[in-house]
Image (cartoon, rainbow, N blue to C red):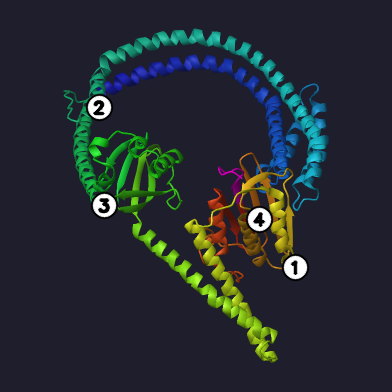
Amino acid sequence: MKNLRTQLLVSNVLLVVMLVGAMAGAVASFFHLGLSIDRILKNNYASVVAAQRMKDALAKLNIASALCIAGEYQEGILQSSGAVSSFLSASNIEAHDITEPGEQACSDALVQGFPAYQRNYEEIITQPPLLSTSQRLVLYKSVMQPQYLGLVAAANKVLIINQRAILRANQQAKQEAARASYISVGVTLVSLACGIVLVWWTVVHALRPLKTLARYAADIGTGHFNQQVVLHRTDEIGTLAVAFNNMAASLQAARKFEQDRLRIAETMSDAALENLYDPVIVTDSNERLVHLNPAAEGLFGNSNSLKGASVAAVLGNSPITAAISDAISSKCVAPSEDDDRYFVSAAGDSQRIYRIRVTPMFNSGREVLGAVAVLEDITHLRQLDNLKSEFIGVASHELRTPVTSLMLSVQILMEGAVGELSPAQLEVVQAQWEDVQRLERMTRDLLDITRLEAGTSPPRYELLSLNRVASEAAARLRARAQAQGITLTSSPAIEDFDFQADGEQITRVLVNVLDNAVRHTPAGGRVELTTSGDAETVTFTISDTGEGIPAAFVDRIFQKFAQVPGTTSGGSGLGLSIAQTIIHTHGGDIKVKSAPGVGTVFTIRVPRYNSKEV
């Protein structure tokens, strides 16, 4: 063992001595170069960074002002977070790092001009707004934009002045580096020649066996673990060969164990998939079929014959195709509760309804390998739902006659047609009248939602004015809101839009949502209805400062008879369900954002044009 160690030690010592000599000359030359670079960083780099930070801060404030004018206050405040302090910090650095001619004037322009711009910015983002949207827009265009451009121009000038100074210093540093390089090259060439001789001698006389080890290591890297190195040496390389042989034996045993484990896991996984009652479809990342379990083969055909075919070619324009495509492209689980995420299979006179659940598959690097679609048979659930709807429709229809009779009887008693009532009797009858009215409203809502779900009350499309529909809906609730001490406002869109819809149904949706907002907003609160539109859709936004909805109940408020515990009661729990059904019938959507104690925002979007003629 001493022979190899001594050889290597002597060779390395000689190399180190030569390297030290070469490095000593290089260090002396480059030390001066380092001082030049340090001067660049000290005198000009800080100003370049400060100028860039000021430009970035001004850009953030400019974008934030535009977002706040557009009504996106939260996004605007988030966008400008830290921008003012960043600008002030950078301008202070620049003011104390004046090193070039003309830089002082630019720095003074930035320091003196920013406070006025900051005041205008704060006036725009103030909540609630002190100025109207049009006033803030004029302030932004006529005052803030010139200020912004002036400040950016000053910052750019600081940046250019210091960049030019850095370029000059860089040119000087290059010249010094060139001189240092010539000296270093000479010393290095001499050291290189000596080093080559030493390395050649070390490789030939001491390290040749390592080539053999490298070749065997490459074989092991390709999976050939049965390699054995035979070297009759007692030095360090011989010890390395023994360790190498032991490693190869251990890797071979580990691979066998892992292969057995994976084989068992694969067998169990295949057995579970094959015996699953629900149909299962497995695809690759290119949406091509990989496997169908027996339940899926009963619907689509033999797995082996379909393997490799695209999902679209086998299933056509099916909800399953869309769900698989969405899951792979979005890299997240496809929603299973959407109306278009159901697959209907007809066999003879019977049909089965399946709910589609698609989950993407990933490797360890989060790359999509494919998707697994499970079709859950919900035929019995749909049958129960249809029976429930039919029962509700029949029951509510049969209740209308006795409810109407009860209302008429209570009204006759209240009018004294069968004799004067005592105050106590009148109080009881009035309570009955309120209960009968609530029962009548619930009966009417049940009939309406049954008809909407059955499709017997399709929309009657007509050409409507966006702002007019919104103002009429708000007018119906304004008197009630004022009686409860609530401010109800309607903010029409700057540009009115015509759209095709059933005016009575859309108005009912807005009234239902506004009624909810008024009922759940305490006195002194605010309810606001705003409108907007574009070439494709019109949007109604209803916001309030009321009780808010707990996160656990936000996704359930559109269900029938949904009631949020602890909030103001008084409704049947059908209004929002009816509203959602109407909007979906129109091809739109209704969404809600809420938090307890903060308020609620409903966003209703409806397509501007429908395929039906008006």
The span from disc 1 to disc 2 (Cα, nearest Å) is 80 Å
Mark nearer the N terminus (2 vs 4): 2
Query: Where 171 sits versus 108, above or below?
Result: above
Mark nearer the N terminus (4 vs 1): 1
Query: Would you name the residue on which mark 1 appears?
Result: 485
Front position among marks 2 and 3? 3
Query: Would you name the residue on which mark 3 appears?
Result: 276
Mark 1: secondary structure: loop
Task: Name the spot of residue 195 as percent of width and height, x first.
Answer: 39, 12
Magenta-span inclusion, residue 225: no
Query: Would you name the residue on which mark 4 appears?
Result: 542
- Dot 4 surroundings within 10 Å: few (below 14), some, or many (20 or more)? many
The span from disc 1 to disc 3 (Cα, nearest Å) is 60 Å
Query: Would you name the residue on which mark 2 appears?
Result: 222
Magenta-span inclusion, residue 607: yes
Q: Quadrant of the N terminus?
A: top left
Q: Amino acid at mark 2?
A: Thr
Q: Is residue 210 left or right of residue 371?
A: left
